[in-house]
């Protein structure tokens, strides 16, 4: 039986870090990856703009591809629109992302006689939304968590030009303005774009600090929610975007997946 695809939605290329883990967890599935790069970056827009845009684009994608699951591979879009999407698509699993505060705290809690220091980087929307504030409150008193809004980091990654050098300069400037003092005991990447500059982030905030993102948890949750899993087929990937150059977008997606070490063929 031919199963319907898993739809993976992001504002641009960042959600490929989630797609990478989905493929590792379920390598015989059919995936449609969509990047809304004509509207990116989401992190510099208002919550209302992101919510309206996310719902509209996901609606059009569901009509076009008839997916059996929707993965919102964007922390900003998750914060702004996940509850509304779950209300609209009650019959479909709708999986969002959230910063990996819990695994970071559990990993470093008790390693010293002081509270562990954790840095969480994300977009301003993610950090201010109730969903994230509730998450923070669950771990109050168990770690010292510094929050660093880094909206321009997404644009740097999407630009594909001198990414590491510009990322390091930008993060150092952000850290100085906030008065933060590296190194940290752990680093949380609260945006799916940020794994692409993981080494640059560690350079600024702690070369030895373990880095946590939401990709593993999202992949496991998606697998758990699917009624059926393909195990006897080959990987199938389809790329779609809102930019006027879909071929260039597809080529960049393939290149970034190979950079992550996962992509091994199966592209439609």
Image (tube, grey):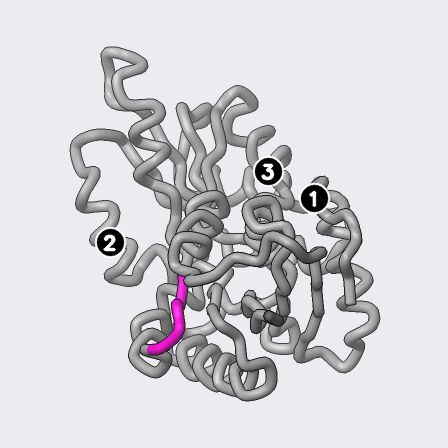
Q: Which mark is residue 133?
A: 2
Most foreground residue, 163 or 252: 252
Residue that lies at the very extreme toward the front in this rendered image = 1
In the image, what residue occupies the spot 35% across and 35% down? 103
Label 1 CA crowd tier, 10 Å (few <14, some 14–19, many 20+) = some
Q: Which residue is mark 3?
A: 198
The earlier-in-sequence mark between 3 and 2 is: 2
CA gap between label 3 and label 2 equals 24 Å
Quarter of the rendering containing residue 61: bottom right
Figure check: 184 above or below 225? above
Residue 224: horizontal and vertical position, in percent? 39, 53
The range drawn in magenta is 91-95
Examine the rendering and report whether any part of residue 38 can be seen. Answer: yes
Most foreground residue, 197 or 10: 10
Quarter of the rendering containing residue 46: bottom left
Residue 52: horizontal and vertical position, in percent? 42, 83
What predominant SS class does the magenta segment belong to? Answer: loop
| Marks 2, 1: nearer the viewer | 1
Q: Are marks 2 and 1 in contact (CB under 8 Å)?
A: no
* SS for dot 3: helix
| Marks 1, 3: nearer the viewer | 1
Q: Which mark is residue 262?
A: 1
In the image, what residue occupies the spot 43% across and 61% down? 226
Side (left or right) of 53 relative to 244: left
Figure check: 51 above or below 42? below
Figure check: 145 above or below 92? above
Label 2 CA crowd tier, 10 Å (few <14, some 14–19, many 20+) = few
* SS for dot 1: loop
Examine the rendering and report whether any part of residue 14 can be seen. Answer: no
Q: Are marks 1 and 3 in contact (CB under 8 Å)?
A: no
Q: Is residue 144 magenta?
A: no
Most foreground residue, 43 or 86: 86
């Amino acid at each position: 039986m031919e199963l319907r695809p898993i739809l993976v939605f992001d504002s641009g290329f960042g959600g490929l870090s989630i797609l990478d883990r989905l493929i590792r967890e379920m390598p015989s599935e059919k995936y449609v990856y969509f990047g809304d790069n004509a509207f990116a970056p989401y992190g510099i827009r208002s919550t209302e703009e992101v919510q309206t845009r996310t719902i509209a684009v996901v609606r059009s994608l569901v009509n076009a591809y008839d997916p059996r699951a929707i993965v919102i591979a964007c922390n900003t879009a998750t914060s702004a629109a996940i509850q509304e999407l779950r209300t609209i698509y009650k019959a479909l699993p709708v999986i969002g992302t959230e910063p990996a505060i819990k695994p970071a705290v559990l990993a470093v809690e008790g390693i010293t006689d002081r509270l562990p220091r954790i840095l969480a980087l994300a977009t301003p929307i993610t950090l201010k939304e109730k969903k994230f504030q509730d998450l923070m409150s669950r771990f109050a008193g168990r770690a010292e968590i510094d929050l660093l809004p880094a909206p321009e980091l997404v644009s740097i990654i999407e630009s594909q030009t001198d990414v590491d050098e510009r990322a390091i300069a930008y993060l150092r400037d952000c850290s100085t303005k906030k008065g933060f003092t590296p190194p940290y005991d752990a680093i949380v990447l609260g945006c799916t774009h940020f794994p692409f500059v993981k080494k640059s982030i560690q350079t600024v905030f702690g070369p030895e600090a373990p880095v946590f993102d939401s990709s593993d948890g999202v992949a496991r949750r998606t697998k758990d929610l699917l009624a059926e899993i393909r195990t006897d087929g080959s990987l199938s990937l389809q790329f779609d975007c809102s930019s006027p150059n879909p071929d260039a977008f597809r080529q960049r997606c393939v290149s970034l997946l190979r950079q992550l070490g996962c992509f091994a063929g199966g592209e439609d």
